[in-house]
Each structure stands twice: as C-alpha cells, then as structure tokens.
Image (spheres, rainbow, N blue to C red):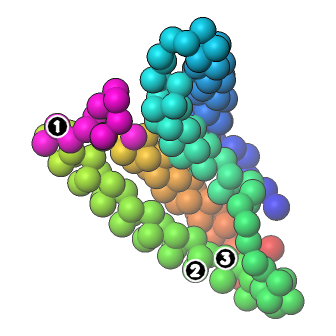
Amino acid sequence: METGKARWHERAGVFASAALLIVLFGLLLTDVILRWLHVEFYWGSEGGGLLMAWMIFLALPMVMRTRGHIATDFVVAHLPDGVKAVLRMAGHVLMIAYLACLVWYCADLAHSNWQGGARFQGILRLPMYLVQSGILVGLLLMLLSEILILYEEARAFGRRGGDAT
C-alpha cells in the first residue's frame, strides 16, 4: 500500500541511485576489460563498494514510502482498522526515534572520521567519511520521509475519526 505521493526528495534519491548504478556498471565494465588486458584498476572493486552504499541508502526513502520492504503483518492484518491505524502510527513514531538515533550516531562517526582523517585499508585509501556521509544523507532522507508519512497517516486518522486504513 502506498502512502500518499512520493516527495521530491524521494524521487531525487531514486534518480541519484539510478545514476550511481550506471556509474557502477561503467566501473565494473572497465574493471573487467582492464583485467582482460592485465591492467590494474582498483576503482572497480573499491569504488564499487562506495557507490553501492550510497545507492542503497539514497533509494531507501522511496522503499519506505511504497512499503517495499519485508514486513510480517499477518497478525496485524486481522485486527480492526482503527487498531491497525494506531499501531501503524506507533510504528512510525518508533521508527522516527530509531532513525534520529542512527542519524546522530552516523553524523558523529562521520564527523570524527573526517576530523581524524581515517581512511579505509584498501589500496585507494579512501576517506571513511565518504561512505559514512552517504549513509547519513540516506538516513536523513528516510527520517524526513518517515515524518511526512506519519503526518499523512495522522491526518487521515483524524479525518476518519480513528477509523483510518
């Protein structure tokens, strides 16, 4: 079930993920061709990991909006509509709190790694904050989406007098 229309930041995240997928494809194709020519190209594997992290987290707000994630709702499906709506909103509140904690932790981690100059152990020695900032951006977009979804569901709940579906 889709909750409202996708917001600009959700569509932008999916678009950015698609663009990164194209870049990832190009990197991997280049890596395969250069390996065949016996030329070392480290961006294929290390850069691919960086792009995959950004790709996944930038698309997550749209997954949340469309409820495209794995869910076990076989018990909730048998409850009255009003109870389902209250449980959904409580779930959104808990998810907002969880995402806020993750945003705080990831921001602190990325900031300390940026200040400390921490780098990955791979050949390229990429700064760790590059991946962590992608995760942070994705988490911030997810938090925004979750707040907007809660707002939409609370309005629908209020309009229907507690019998929102």
Label 2: state its secondary structure.
Answer: helix
Q: Which residues are magenta?
A: 116-131
Q: The disc labelled 1 sits on which kind of residue?
A: Gly
Which quarter of the figure has residue 31? top right
Which quarter of the figure has residue 75? bottom right
Mark linked to residue 88: 3
Please, is residue 84 above or below residue 48 in the view?
Answer: below
Q: The disc labelled 2 sits on which kind of residue?
A: Ala
Q: The disc labelled 3 sits on which kind of residue?
A: Arg
Q: Position of residue 122 (x, y in %)?
A: 35, 36
The residue labelled by disc 1 is 117
Q: Position of residue 105 (x, y in %)?
A: 30, 60
Which residue lies at the image location 37% right of the left edge and 57% below the top edge?
Answer: 103
Furthest residue in direction front, as rendered: 38
Neighbours of disc 3 within 10 Å: few (<14), some (14-19), many (20+): some
Q: Position of residue 3 (x, y in %)?
A: 74, 57
Q: Nearer the viewer, residue 5 or 33?
A: 33
Q: Position of residue 130 (x, y in %)?
A: 35, 36
The residue labelled by disc 2 is 90
Mark linked to residue 8: none
